Image: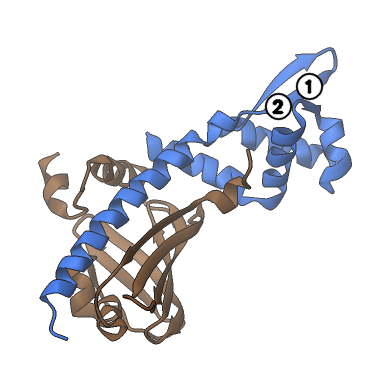
Amino acid sequence: MNETPAEALSVVVERDVPYPPEKVWRALTQPHLIEEWLMKNDFKPDVGLRFNLRADWGAVDCQVLEVEWNKTLSYTWAAYGLESVVTWTLTPTTTEPHLRMEQSGFRPDQQAGLPERQGRVAAVLCEPGADLGADRLNER
Amino acid sequence: MPVTAANKVFAAIADPTRRAIFERLARSGELTVRALTDKAGVSQPAVSKHLGVLKLAGLVCDRHEGRQTHYSARPQGLTPLADWMSLYAAFWQDRFDRLEDLLKRMDQ
């Protein structure tokens, strides 16, 4: 094994986004916009603020760790019995801005959800292009 | 249930001492509790306890020989983590798609 297991544990998604950084930042930080692509929420870009991301199946507990306007946004992400940190980085390049999401530092969450719920969420997540909303859960 | 398996593995390697023990076994091959204790910086009972957690998580296996128990790493025990990460990767790809759709619709 070449990498330290714990350090290798991160999910990274990055894409070029052909829009002004200010606009992407709005989508990442304004609650009504976050709701459109992620989940319902009571987010505010205030360091230390605790907020929830909510769906009918439950909630993700979060706390804002870092806010650097139009550049970096980082918050904790506690769900399915595990806590991790989600960091958004917006890098202006000569062509178009680059958006990177890294979720890392997975560790057990002391306030873990019910195992049953975790299993159902995992089952939903397993489906390609899975929607974490309630629709599919209700079919079960 | 994959999440439970993943949680056990995450829990096992969340502890730095256990992680160090696992990494040492992964690098060195088979070692006895005593050999592990020499460099772990904690007592032998503590090392044994950590090994028990690692074993339950499927990260190490043991082999008894006389009075000695030999431990070795099971790298395949990390599979539930890899599975879990791939679920999250799919989730975020999907959310990035939605984010791009939203950006297309938004005013400047």
Give B64 or B27, whichever is nearer the viewer.
Answer: B27
| Chain whose colour in the figure is blue | B
Same subunit: marks 1 and 2: yes
Q: Residue at x 43, y 71 (%)?
A: A75
Q: Amino acid at mark 2?
A: Ser
Residue found at the far top of this picture? B66
Please state if A42 lies on the left or on the right of B12 as rendered: left
Q: Nearer the viewer, residue A67 or A107?
A: A67
Residue at mark 1: chain: B
* In the rendered image, the vertical position of residue B66 relative to residue B80, given as above or below: above
Residue at the image position 18 percent from the left and 58 percent from the top = A56
Q: Chain under label 2?
A: B
Percent coordinates x, y for residue A118 in the rendering: 33, 46
Asked which quadrant contains residue B31, the reply is top right
Q: Is residue B105 visible?
A: yes
Helix, strand, or loop for circle 1?
Answer: strand
Could you tell me if the residues under marks 1 and 2 are in contact, i.e. CB atoms within 8 Å? Answer: no
B73 left or right of A128 in image: right
Residue that carries the numbered disc 2 in the rendered image: B72
In terms of secondary structure, where does tag 2 sit?
A: strand
Q: Which residue is mark 1?
A: B69
Residue at the image point whose x is 29% and y is 67% from the top: A53
- Seen as rendered, the residue at the extreme right is B38
Q: Quadrant of the N terminus of chain A?
A: top right
Alpha-carbon span between mark 1 and mark 2: 10 Å
Colour setting = by chain
Chain A shade in the render? brown
Q: How many discs mark residues in the rendered view?
A: 2
Residue A115 drawn at (x, y percent): 37, 43
Q: Which mark is residue A100?
A: none
From the top left corner, tell me how far across and down residue A92 is, in percent: 38, 79
